[in-house]
Image (cartoon, rainbow, N blue to C red):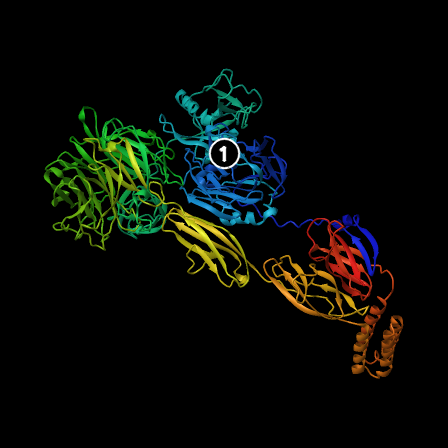
Amino acid sequence: MKHMQTARRHIRRSLTAFSRTTLASFLFALSLAAAQANCTPPPPGLVGWWKGEGDGSDVLGNSPGSLLGGTVTSVGKVGQAFQFDGVNDSVRIPAGAAINVGTADGFTVECWINPADVSVRQPIAEWNNGANTWGVHFHVDPLSFGAGPGALYANIVTSSGMWRQLYSPAGTVKPNEFQHVALTYDKASGLARLYCNGVIVAQRSFGSFTPHTTFDLYVGRRPAGPGNEVYAFQGLIDEFSLYNRALSTAEIAAIHAVGTAGKCVPTNPPPPSGPSILAGPITNTANGSIYFLLSSSTWAEAEAKAVALGGHLVTINDAGENDWVFNTFANFGGQTSHLWIGLNDAAQEGAFVWSSGQPITYTRWAPGEPNEFVPGEDYAHINSPVYSSLGNWNDHANSASDSSGHPFRGVVEISPAAPPPPPPVAGGVPRIDSFTPRVARPGDAVEITGANFSATPSDNIVWFGAVRASVVAASVSKLVVQVPPGATYAPPSVTVGGLFAEAPLPFLPTYGSGEDLLAGQFIQQDLMTSSGSLAALSFADLNGTGYPDVIMAAEFGSQNFVLHENLGSGPDGWVGFAEAVPLSTRGSGYRGHAGDVDNDGNPDLVSVTRGPGGNLTVAVRRNLGIPGALSPDSFEPTVSFPVEALTEKVLLADLNGDGKKELVVAAGQRIRVFPGAAAPGSFTTNSVAAPFDLPLGSMPSDIVTGDFDGDGRWDLVVSLPSENRVILFKNLSMTGDFGHASFANSVVFTGVSQSLTAADLNADGRLDLLLDSEANHIVVLLNQTGSPGGLPGMFGAPISVSTGGGPRSIAVGDIDGDGRPDLVVGSSASGMVSVMLNRSSGTLVDTNAFPVAFELPTPQDMLFPFSPPLRVAVADINLDGRADIAVCGRFPGMRLFLNFALPAIASMNPSLLKVNEGTTATFTATVTGTAPLRLQWSFGGVDLPGETNATLQLAGVTYGQAGTYTLTVSNLAGVATTNAVVQVNRAPVASIGATELLLISPNGLNAIAVLDGEASSDPDGDALAFGWFRAGESNAFATTAVAAATLPVGSNALSLVVSDGMTSARRNFVVEVITTAQAVGRLAAAVAAGAPRPQPLLASLRAAMAAIDRSQPAVAANQLQAFQNKVQAQVAPHDPELAAQLIAEAQAIIDALIGGPEPGPVVIEITRIAPGPEGKPSLRIRGKAGRQHIVEVSTNGIAWEPIGLAASRGGDEFEFNDSAAPGAGARFYRVVSPR
């Protein structure tokens, strides 16, 4: 009623007389507010919500923002929105625990945007320090990668500064309209996604890392960056929201679907979250403790966070520790801050205690402190920003900043503790008997069968070569393991309770393509070092990030190892590496690599070194397993063992089956074996037993190990190039004694070989041998028996395979993704790396089985005279699932050949197609990416059988086929989706409603027909256009739903055509116009046919006809009234229905004769307007019975349009429901009644 009370103040009435037309006008202005749709509850994980309702407040109260540069709010998608001028406007949200979502399990940024221009860079959100460094950012960016106008772009910068970029196709975002956009990242899956209007427009797998979100968060602006890059958003941003997890596609779609209703504002917002981790873990090598730096917070919040991390605020025990804490954290990230420490007297004034409970052994109060300057100064901190006594202690109240606004940050200390004892293992040493499948892709499940596993999945440490795998199910005899990205060609291993087992055969990671590779497909990337010649190259995840890190072993110099942490790759495939970590093992090194010497699950470093005085040793540096960036502190000091002779190679293998690894060294003219005795978490000089030697006749050049005869014991194979022999030492060891008598040797090849490689080349379940040769070929020794105890005749005749250059090292991996092991061969003679693809047939291998597919060039520095041989390795370095190639030599570094797969990208243009029912709808997507691309169309979440091409054609479309069709395109590098929306248009229905098909001409020439098309409808609710046509004419004589037309006497063939803009419907009809004489004649015929005692009635009708012939309409009307009276008297008592019909027909003739029931003006009045069905206006009208009343509408009171006929309610009462009225805006009504 509120709307009606307001509306009545706008009522205007007028009465105007026209020639032959009586008009009553009722003018009415009414604004109807559109009903608000239901809001949707915010998804869990919401940590900040800035609605832009006049200020920068956070709905949750965690992180209020400031409007900078004159930012204002204006009408938005949901209420008000931030309006930015594209110059210097922005919203700045201060750095803090709530918005540091990089430390969480993932994050989401979502909002509505309405950019003024999509052809320029438009920052939506960016973490930025306001100086020269940015963190995670989310933009409209047509420039990066040349994507084009309207592309969305995100760079999820890692905490170490590496870029993780993804972008959508051009045209994703439109100018000058609101659209919902979102960026999500999930740490567990490593998947990042971009959304627009609830649909994924880009996604990419980056692996797990910590996004850089420690800075202030800017909405609508990049305030600064390298090279003074400054950009600003022009347009509107609404409902800006931040979450500490990756929202699902369904959650994003739900927010988009509610549109203007938005998210429901919580009645009780959650309390602000605690401080976040800004730095750490960082190890203090002086005391072994691990430290974290927290974001700005109170002392109590910082201590609570410290306890949650497993420690306390730092306990400082000496000046060295105080200085270390101050120097490490006081100016972290370029921002100076006070540092909370654990000392406090909150429990009793003046009785200071450490929150850790440790005794106070050291203090460093500033002069005059502690002084309880104001009540509540109960908490100690290290001075930094403003006080004169930097690095000394002061007491302060429990606040997050001092009176000048300088922040307090907590320093957390976690004291070192002895490693927990390994879980018990039922049945003793684990054993791997087999695994299936032996070839699989990353993410596939592999079953490992054996014995003595742990039934608790997390107690089984499984590695697939360079990276650790996830165990998803376990029993004592079976493990179900997911193949990890970065897996390399190697036997899977499992460590349980500090005991180790290795599969007898290697696992081959593939990517299921089998494509024809070209050298140009490989991206070349050089990684420089300063350590001179490199003698060995390998990969292993040294710090648990899931990325294979680079391990280069130097031939000369004091730094035996050069480590580069793998930071992942961007969309261009290039790999980011951290700065080199040089690592010494007390002498010049040679042939080092990674291996878990103590079975704690962390790869340690093992190498051969030459110390002062030429002393030769095997050196081990145990990996401490500290999360975070690699550094020299990631490894324990060197533990070394003398070998007394020139050593070429050291390897790790469990030769005696006790679950501990032996150190096996090819040294001088012997093989020296150090039996393993290490306990998990410790490696000392007592971690190996007394060594024993296996004598050789000359210097070995290489050594490999494996179960060549299938008896479950690992044998040794060594090459002796000066003797032109390769010897296999069969392992005879049994439980108990283990020594030189545990091996029996036999010559398996006669000829020169510098390097050895073990591989199952023909997938027959037996380990074969690959030997290099300087005669431009390699030698393949196929294992023909592999039966326990079989040694003589184990290997078949040598098979010579040409390499095109002098081979010096061989690596194995599935380079082309066909599920077969290929060979990568490094040649020092030609300086090329030969890629030899496996083209063998079944188990048959011959000289043509490994043709050279192409060669890759190495730096010329690798070919320096007397340089060490080229060393090659195969690993999935950028985690795209494809095997990459690495090579090193004299060149001070390594060269990568990245087998890069371009991610799948799909786009649809147009993405919306509206077709008429029964026609054909055709969509064609643009699809790019590295083959093989897998395409699948789906509808309603169900795959469409056979629809696996870029084009989808729907013939004879029915209404039930309307909806969203999704094309999913995938390859090993990722998954992309694009949507096609089909709207099926149903034909309208034409209806002539209350149109009278028989009219009586009042003048004998013509009559006014009121044509009523208001009952026409469209099943889709589309607006209709009307056209009224005479037969044979192509131009409409009227185009409104209701029209008045003057028709001549006779039969008038007419048509109504209604159109919804796509299709139309036609209704043909005939309006017959007759004279009054003809009408009387028809009435007489009806009386004669049906009325009782018709003669008196017919007499009146004949008199009326005679009067009409004499042009006496009044006399005729009187005769017809006399007829009506007779009908009432004679017919009504016996047949009231017939009587009513005859009286009505006579009245129609009377009206035609005299121009209506009453001559002169007729008053028509709109008596009421009230809300009717669905809240639309309903009109009540008082007019004249027997007349047609046309309702007209206007928005300005000047131009009028007929919209319908009022329906009779009986007598002089009529009504009309304006179902087409809009929800808001002025609307005027009038009623016209033609004579």
Residue 514 vs residue 187, the one in the foreground: 514
Q: Which residue is mark 1?
A: 127
* Amino acid on which disc 1 is placed: Trp
Across and down, in percent, residue 966 comes to 47, 54
Among the 4 quarters of the image, the one containing residue 292: top left
Q: Is residue 751 left or right of residue 977?
A: left
Residue 443 vs residue 449, the one in the foreground: 443
Among the 4 quarters of the image, the one containing residue 1045: bottom right
Does 635 sit above or below residue 107? above
Residue 932 vs residue 1039, the one in the foreground: 1039
Is residue 534 visible in the rendered structure shown here?
Answer: no
Q: Is residue 547 left or right of residue 1204?
A: left
Among the 4 quarters of the image, the one containing residue 70: top right
Across and down, in percent, residue 141 comes to 49, 39
Is residue 499 visible in the rendered structure shown here?
Answer: yes
Across and down, in percent, residue 762 comes to 22, 52
Q: Secondary structure at mark 1?
A: strand
Label 1 environment density (alpha carbons within 10 Å; few <14, some 14–19, many ≥20) = many
Residue 731 vs residue 819, the one in the foreground: 819
